[in-house]
Image: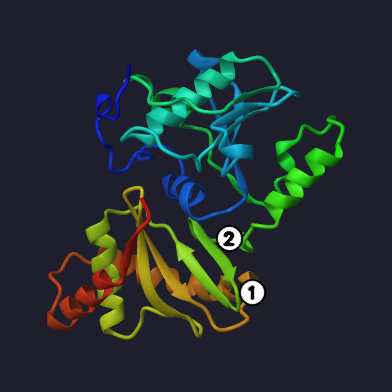
Amino acid sequence: MATASSIDFVLRPFEGLPGEPDWVALRELVPAATATARTTADHGARDITVTTVLPDGWAALHRADGVVLLALQTVGGSGDPSRDLAAALLEALDSEPGTAIETVGLPEPGPRLQDVLDPTVPFEVTVLDTFGYWIAPDTEMTDDLKHAVEEADAGIIDTKKLPGVEAAYWVRMGAKEFLRWAQPHEEQQVLDALARLHAKRASGFDGSKFIGYFRSTGLVVPVWELARGSEAEDIEAALREFAPSFTAALENTEPLDANERRARAGIVARQVTLR
């Protein structure tokens, strides 16, 4: 029987996949979204739909119309989510249409997503405001199905993906709006960059305030609180203007000065680890 120790812990399980920051965002931050992927020729060159979540926490679903969905927000697993997800995906591909893969337990060492998915296919994310995509288009919408989707929809937090930069998500939580921007770089590089900007009082943009960061699946996700009432489209231009200064700070390899080190210490004190 497989045990959690059968598979070594992997800090960045999605490293090497197209759109690693978006994989992390869909696994940890985005309530309802889908993204595109395709298996390699060795695994049938099948188009699949990656999704945030499926009904009842299912790991995957081979929908009645043949579409295969793979859920990222699942409970438990080994030390390598990439291996866990690959196991669920391969089981779904081998199943009959209409089959839900409820759980895969703890798989033995084997192929990871990096071995199963075609790296030339972009990971294109579509943020949604309904889980209606769970249901195949030709499926009769019974009262039970309708209720299940409506109940799930009620828990969706208003979220939008911002164009022009990678893996940046606007979110409204209660009466406040935030930007969560998953970064593809090493943690120390991102923290140094944020410290350089914060020490110069240049870590915000267009009324926004940098408030801290998440550490999630091996990546850093800085968070800004936005001007009250800001819609996603209101910050698109400002974020594009801010991005070059952030990039320059990321590329700066000079040692931090005293002010920057103090800023960095303050930033680290505000971090939260999601997984």
| Residue occupying image coordinates x 62% and y 62% | 157
What secondary structure is found at the residue carrying circle 2?
loop
Looking at the image, residue 20 lies above or below residue 37: below
Seen at 51% across and 16% down, the residue is 43
Q: Earlier in the sequence, mark 2 or mark 1?
A: 2
Q: Residues within 10 Å of mark 2 (few under 14, many from 20)?
A: some
Secondary structure type for disc 1: loop
Q: Which residue is mark 1?
A: 231
Q: Which mark is residue 163?
A: 2
Q: Residue 180 placed where, x, y %?
A: 47, 64
Q: Quadrant of residue 265?
A: bottom left
Disc 2 + disc 1, Cβ < 8 Å: no
Given the image, on which type of amino acid does mark 1 rest?
Glu
Could you tell me residue 65's position as x and y percent?
Answer: 75, 24
How many marks overall? 2
Say if 142 sits above or below 45 in the image.
below
Which quadrant would the N terminus be assigned to in this image? top left
Tag 1: Cα neighbours inside 10 Å, few (<14), some, or many (≥20)? some
Residue drawn at the location 63% of the way across and 81% of the way down: 229
240 with respect to 274 (left or right) = right
